[in-house]
Image (spheres, rainbow, N blue to C red):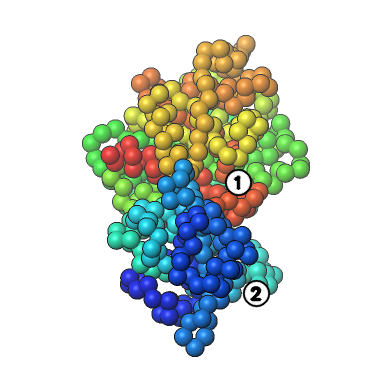
């Protein structure tokens, strides 16, 4: 989707040449000069300007008629203002994406929006347009996206400059969605790395890749244990954007299980196809690194992806096996389907030894239990530092990638003690998301601020949202970017 900016010309006839013009309307604020016919049409459609409401009419324009749409942005000073604006921008795209219209104008004249508010409308409009039709060969013309360009007309001063940053974020979100959506025969550890290399080429991001032999020499027995049932070689991908020198870096670590059968503890067949997105944490890290590089963020950030495929095989890890992690701690593998934490523990140890970050934030589609707890509206947050937790919570609220904090503590930690090793990889059925977080915490060095984000319920949604269609959401990119903006660049 192309977002362009036009000169501040609010007269309707020139806009009519674009074929379709969308105007933003506050609740109960349809312009008085809209005309009696438009007023009557709005009343008939029960359009009041609530956030996300949309209706359109044909209006006279010169010798013909123009298609005029009105998008509601809700109360001018209502709660959740930015979310309301995103609903408006997303609604415009959702309505006209396959309408046959190839271009539309969003007319900001008279909207009263600030530059950052106008940019939010445009970001949502672009994000809602993303689709992955690569493998669909029989779409009818009516099903194919037609809308290719949105022109911002009379945007508030400063919006176009802000859009450069928002466009970088949009590219990062779209890249994450692409990685998460691709099937497991296309995106596996090695191809994930190659796609990231291609997308990050020329951005200034430094890339380091570890293969099986590298990881074996480092003693990554937990990650390699997950991978040993697959013919796909595991990878560690590290991406560093050093936009600011000096302080210790911040690390984002993503779980990248490119397909998860559960291994020997095999999952039920129904719904297993969804496990192509068990690398959603790694996808979010890759998209974030692209966004930071594109907007040239003034921060030192390392993105690390632990990439494996978890398959059943004659060589696969067995329940009851004991593995030695890179940290030297041993793990009794009770359930091979609790594999993400085994990947993360070695990735977390490695990034600490290699880069000595001050802060680590890991993202993982780690537990089904988090979906039972929070549904698809929030990701779970576990944190050893109250300041970091508050910073991430604020970033979640500002970005729309919402978080909800869960407890950690010794009572939960002892639930993963093993009778024959330092720990086991699962606790009892209850508190499953918490014991998973407790497991990862055992590998975080003293003095390192750490947060674990369980995003299992938010990376893939079965219904459309304000800024996404069904499927991959790109969750995590906007959250991490906002954290970088508000904390590392402040």
Q: Secondary structure at mark 2?
A: loop
- In the image, 287 versus 329, the foreground residue is 287
Q: Which residue is mark 2?
A: 141
Q: Which residue is mark 1?
A: 460
- In the image, 322 versus 435, the foreground residue is 435
Residue 203 lies, with reference to residue 251, above or below; the image says below
- The answer, for residue 2, to whether it is visible in the render is no
Mark 2 crowdedness (10 Å alpha carbons): few <14, some 14-19, many ≥20: few
Whether pointer 2 and pointer 1 mark residues with C-beta atoms closer than 8 Å, the reply is no
Q: Residue at the location (33% across, 70% down)?
A: 8
Residue 209 image-quadrant placement: top left
In percent of width and height, residue 359 lies at 37, 30
Mark before the other along the chain sequence, 2 or 1? 2
Q: Is residue 237 left or right of residue 318?
A: left
In percent of width and height, residue 369 lies at 64, 30
- In the image, 33 versus 229, the foreground residue is 33
In percent of width and height, residue 341 lies at 55, 29
- The answer, for residue 463, to whether it is visible in the render is yes
Residue 361 lies, with reference to residue 424, above or below; the image says below
Mark 1 crowdedness (10 Å alpha carbons): few <14, some 14-19, many ≥20: many
The circle drawn on residue 125 is: none
Residue 3 image-quadrant placement: bottom left
Residue 130 lies, with reference to residue 217, above or below; the image says below
């Amino acid at each position: 989707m192309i977002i362009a900016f036009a000169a501040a010309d609010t007269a309707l006839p020139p806009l009519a040449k674009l074929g379709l013009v969308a105007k933003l309307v506050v609740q109960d604020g349809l312009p008085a000069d809209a005309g009696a016919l438009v007023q009557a049409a709005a009343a008939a459609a029960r359009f009041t300007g609530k956030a996300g409401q949309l209706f359109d009419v044909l209006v006279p324009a010169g010798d013909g008629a123009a298609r005029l749409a009105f998008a509601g942005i809700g109360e001018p000073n209502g709660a959740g203002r930015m979310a309301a604006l995103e609903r408006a921008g997303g609604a415009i795209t959702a309505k006209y994406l396959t309408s046959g219209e190839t271009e539309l104008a969003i007319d900001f004249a008279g909207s009263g929006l600030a530059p950052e508010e106008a940019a939010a409308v445009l970001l949502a409009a672009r994000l809602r347009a993303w689709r992955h039709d690569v493998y669909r060969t029989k779409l009818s013309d009516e099903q194919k996206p037609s809308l290719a360009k949105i022109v911002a007309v009379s945007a508030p001063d400063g919006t176009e400059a802000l859009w450069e940053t928002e466009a970088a974020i949009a590219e990062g979100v779209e890249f994450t969605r692409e990685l998460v959506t691709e099937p497991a025969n296309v995106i596996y550890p090695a191809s994930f790395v190659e796609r990231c290399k291609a997308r990050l080429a020329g951005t200034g991001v430094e890339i380091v890749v570890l293969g099986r032999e590298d990881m074996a020499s480092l003693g990554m027995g937990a990650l390699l244990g997950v991978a040993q049932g697959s013919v796909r070689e595991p990878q560690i991908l590290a991406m560093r954007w050093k936009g600011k020198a000096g302080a210790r870096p911040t690390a984002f670590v993503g779980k990248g299980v490119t397909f998860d059968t559960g291994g020997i503890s095999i999952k039920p067949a129904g719904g297993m196809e969804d496990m192509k997105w068990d690398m959603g944490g790694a996808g979010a890290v890759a998209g974030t690194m692209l966004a930071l590089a594109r907007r040239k963020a003034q921060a030192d950030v390392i993105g690390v992806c632990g990439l494996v495929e978890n398959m059943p095989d004659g060589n696969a890890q067995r329940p009851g096996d004991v593995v030695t992690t890179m940290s030297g701690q041993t793990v009794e593998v009770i359930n091979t389907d609790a594999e993400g934490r085994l990947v993360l523990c070695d990735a977390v140890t490695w990034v600490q030894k290699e880069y000595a970050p001050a802060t680590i934030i890991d993202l993982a589609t780690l537990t089904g239990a988090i979906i039972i707890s929070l549904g698809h509206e929030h990701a779970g947050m576990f944190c050893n530092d109250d300041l970091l937790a508050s910073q991430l919570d604020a970033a979640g609220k500002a970005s729309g990638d919402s978080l909800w904090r869960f407890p950690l503590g010794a009572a939960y930690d002892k639930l993963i003690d093993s009778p024959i090793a330092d720990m086991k990889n699962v606790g009892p059925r209850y508190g499953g998301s918490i014991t998973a977080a407790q497991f990862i915490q055992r590998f975080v060095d003293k003095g390192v601020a750490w947060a674990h984000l369980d995003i299992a319920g938010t990376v893939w949604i079965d219904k459309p949202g304000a800024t996404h269609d069904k499927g991959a959401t790109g969750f995590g990119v906007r959250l991490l970017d906002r954290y970088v903006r508000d904390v590392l660049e402040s």
